[in-house]
Amino acid sequence: MSLPWGKSVVARPFAGGCAPEQRVAALQKLLLETAALLQANPRQLKAYRALTHTYFQPAATQEQAAEQLDMPFSTYRRHLNHGLSYLVAYLWRQEVEINRL
């Protein structure tokens, strides 16, 4: 199913006459705001920190990110995957809900 640009939570800031720099800034803001929701729940804080050290304030390698977070690499990857799954699910729910209106 194709989502109309006018109703899409994710796509709306990127439609139309925005310059590429504005679209990049809008996407970064959206991802940062969504990831920040993980901080509110202490059980999800490690997922937020894994996302931060991987994408928002990245370490040189994922191994270094795990080291900075003081966790084994496999644990870091588990938290990173949880954070990514959360971002995808949250943004998808936003799309589905706004398109129901």
Image (tube, rainbow, N blue to C red):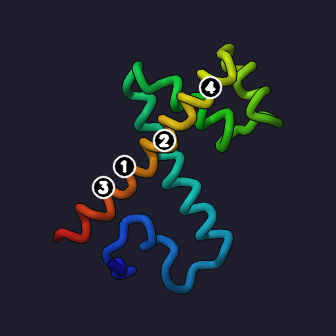
Q: CA distance from mark 4 to mark 2?
A: 16 Å
Q: Secondary structure at mark 1?
A: helix
| Label pair 4/2, CB-CB below 8 angstroms | no
Cα distance in 3D space between marks 4 and 3: 26 Å
Horizontal side, residue 54 vs residue 60: left or right:
left
Q: Is residue 42 depicted above or below 47 in this figure?
A: above
User: Are the residues flagged by discs 1 and 4 in contact, CB closer than 8 Å?
Assistant: no
Q: CA distance from mark 1 to mark 3?
A: 5 Å
Asked which secondary structure carries label 3, the reply is helix
**Residue that numbered label 2 is attached to:** 35
Give the percent coordinates (x, y) of residue 61: 80, 35
**Alpha carbons under labels 1 and 2: distance apart:** 10 Å
Q: Which residue is mark 3?
A: 93
Farthest left residue in view: 101
Q: Where does label 1 land, which residue?
A: 90
Residue placed at 55% from the left, 61% from the top?
A: 27
Front: mark 2 or 3: 3
* Front tag of 1 and 2: 1
C-alpha distance separating marks 2 and 3: 14 Å
Pick the front one: 30 or 44: 44
